Amino acid sequence: MSFFEEKNAEMDRYLETHASSEPEILKKLRRETYQKTTQPHMISGYQQGRLLTIVSQMMQPKNILEVGTFTGYATLCLAAGMTKDGKITTLDVNEDLAYLPRKYFAESEYVDQIDFKLLDAKEFLKNTDEIFDLVFIDADKENYAEYFRLIKPRTRSGSVVMFDNVLWYGKVLEENPKQRSTQVIKELNDLIAKDEDFENLILPLRDGVNFLRRK
């Protein structure tokens, strides 16, 4: 859920009506996500989806990694900019929900370029030698700092990495948070800010996106 969606619904509607139109397949996927999942707020959503698409279209990446597929909305947004011979690897561990992204991947023009794996991301990153041009992480927050450590060696100069939910509904302002997820997100944001190999900016879009570029 976005900050404005929760605090100022009128502003949220304004932001949506002044963004580019949402492709029909994404409208259908978003609608079905709200109909058939118990936590539909986990979807990247319209505004963030437009950001992911624009970034991907600007970069034209050949190799994309997504950690946390959910229903596949962000996957399709990221796929929109990859090269014709490009590939997006998207990882999740929720077998019960896998039918939904598979359905929409099969309907999309990117069906042959999407590699959907039901696999723990830490294990994947420890065993792959691939280098990624664009990475989007929206998964279990308790592992965010570890994902950053594992993803860094899998990037090169010019690679872009994005972490979602880095404001955590404002909980990052807590001085001594009790919630483990809040502690790790604060650790992640500190690690990134101090890492001289990256340039970064936290975008206050939706629940906060930490946007990194490898120098």
Image: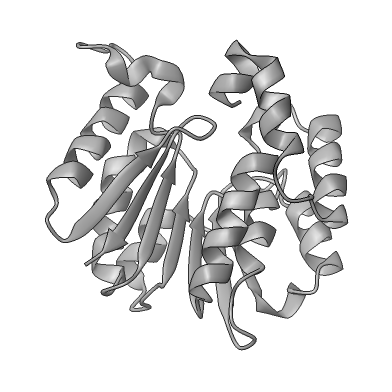
Residue drawn 86% across the image and 31% down it: 35
Q: Position of residue 86 (x, y in %)?
A: 57, 82
Q: Position of residue 100 (x, y in %)?
A: 79, 50
Determine which quarter of the picture holds residue 106: bottom right
Determine which quarter of the picture holds residue 48: top right
Which quadrant would the N terminus be assigned to in this image? top right
Which quadrant would the C terminus be assigned to in this image? bottom left
Q: Nearer the viewer, residue 72 or 180?
A: 72
Q: Nearer the viewer, residue 114 or 120?
A: 114
Display coloring:
one colour
Determine which quarter of the picture holds residue 34: top right
Q: Position of residue 184 (x, y in %)?
A: 28, 31
Residue drawn 36% across the image and 16% down it: 171
Residue drawn 73% across the image and 74% down it: 110
In the image, farthest residue toward the bottom: 85
Q: Is residue 169 left or right of residue 86?
A: left
Mark yes or no: residue 81 visible.
yes
Q: Nearer the viewer, residue 99 or 22?
A: 22
Q: How many marks?
A: 0
Residue drawn 26% across the image and 39% down it: 188
Q: Nearer the viewer, residue 163 or 90?
A: 163
Q: Position of residue 24 (x, y in %)?
A: 87, 54
Mark yes or no: residue 69 visible.
no
143 over 104 or under it: above or below: above
Q: Is residue 39 left or right of residue 139?
A: right
